[in-house]
Amino acid sequence: MKTTQGFSIRWGAGVLAVALGMPLAAPIWAQGFAAGASPATASSAASAPSYASGRATAAGDDEREQREDDLYDAGTEAIDDQKWDKAVDKFDQLAKMHGKRADAALYWKAWAQNKLGRRAEALTTLDELKRTSPQSKWAADGKALEIEVRQASHNPVSPDAYQDDCELKLLAINGLQQMDPEKAAPMLEKMLHGTACPKLRGQALFVLAQSNSPQAHTIIANAARNSDDPELQRKAIQDLGLFSGDWGRQQLSEIYASAKDIETKKRVMQAFMVSGDRAHLLAAAKGERDAEMRAEAIRQLGVMGAREEVWDLYQKESSVEVKKKILNALWISGDLDHVSQLAKAEKDRELRIAAIKDLGLMGEKSGDTLVSLYQSDPDKDVKHAVIQGLFLSGNAKAMVTIARKETDPELKKAIVRQLSLMQSKEAADYLMEILNK
């Protein structure tokens, strides 16, 4: 409405100027004043066209931004739905608007083109992104996408092209690793021991560990043996266990045999566990002279779920302290049957009570066994251990069961004390029952 009024005032002032024989170049306010309008009215008329033009421009900008938003949303939705052709079309339209989202549009257009297998077109789009928006974050992401596209085209980017960008260089080396491992290995080794990219040494090891290249094997084995760089050694030992199969297990065995410090041996044991190497862990548990290392080997066997091997170790062991470690490993492995057996029949009182407490940590499935032990064993220490075990397992129902039958005031107080700490309907109901008596 204001735009129309402004146009009418402006048009009317022009007509009056012509009618009065005034030159059209004269200021509008002068034309209006000559036509009999007051100065205030003329001034208002003069400003109306500029105001109307600004409103029109703002409206146009809003419409343009809304159009960009709509195209971007449609393009990303197409990507989510894996409708690559539609995504290319929407992002192409958005890029051609040359607006604030043109750089993002070019990136996602190239992404979708790559998904369609149109890699030459994707590279052309990425070149346009680099040319038009060299400082954009999307241009940086585009470099990583370019590496991926070229790798898929069996035309890897030279890692030397990214001397100043460690992450992109590693991506490029990874691509080269897939096609020419012997060329990639020296570059990865340089990243391991160089100072340019210290934060990416772990990723470089990861790439080496998954390679079948003899050269890569040698590099990671040397890193696992080199104690001069403890963090790199730790990661190399871990990766040998995770990715290197039988060859890695053999390397770990040799490293364990030659290691002088306990920390390195513990790391190797963890790698044995990760690789599923029960044989070497069992050998360490049986033959290791250092008590701490024997305990660690037993613990790792428990983590692996090697129940029969751990149980066999328990039966052959004479030291109560070592048996405690083995019992803990049985608990870690979830061996409810053998822990229950020890809770019922272990002759050593200290070990038996430890087994009862471990039963409680194994959850409500141990409830029947614990209640049975409470009812059959007159030893108060055993009964207290059962109460503690039931509390740890959250088994309020079982605790109420033994509380109802308990006549010993001390034991009953111990049960009620634990029930008062539990967030349980059974516990609350029983406590109310006591209060109402």
Image: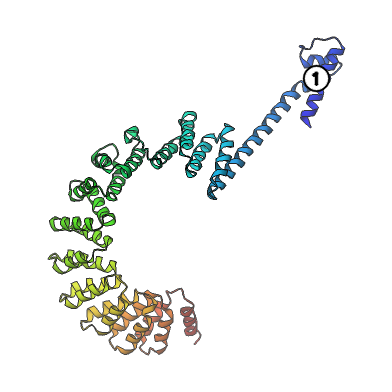
Q: Is residue 266 left or right of residue 336?
A: left
Question: Is 118 rendered above or below residue 20?
Answer: below
Question: Is 264 rendered above or below residue 35?
Answer: below
Percent from the top left, x then y, of residue 133?
48, 31
Residue at x-position 32% and y-position 43%: 179
Residue at x-position 65% and y-position 33%: 61
| Residue 419 placement: quadrant | bottom left
Which quarter shows the N terminus? top right
Percent from the top left, x then y, of residue 88?
55, 40
Camera-side residue of 403 and 281: 281
| Residue 326 placement: quadrant | bottom left
Camera-side residue of 129 and 10: 129
Question: Is 218 rendered above or below residue 437?
Answer: above
Percent from the top left, x then y, of residue 402?
39, 86
Residue at x-position 27% and y-position 86%: 379
Camera-side residue of 36 and 147: 147
Q: Is residue 189 left or right of residue 79?
A: left
Under tag 1, what secondary structure? helix
Q: Can residue 206 be spotted in the picture?
A: yes
Disc 1 residue type?
A: Ala
Q: Can residue 99 be spotted in the picture?
A: no
Q: How is the image coloured?
A: rainbow
Percent from the top left, x then y, of residue 174?
33, 43
Camera-side residue of 251 and 202: 251
Q: Check disc 1 and report the residue beneath it.
A: 42
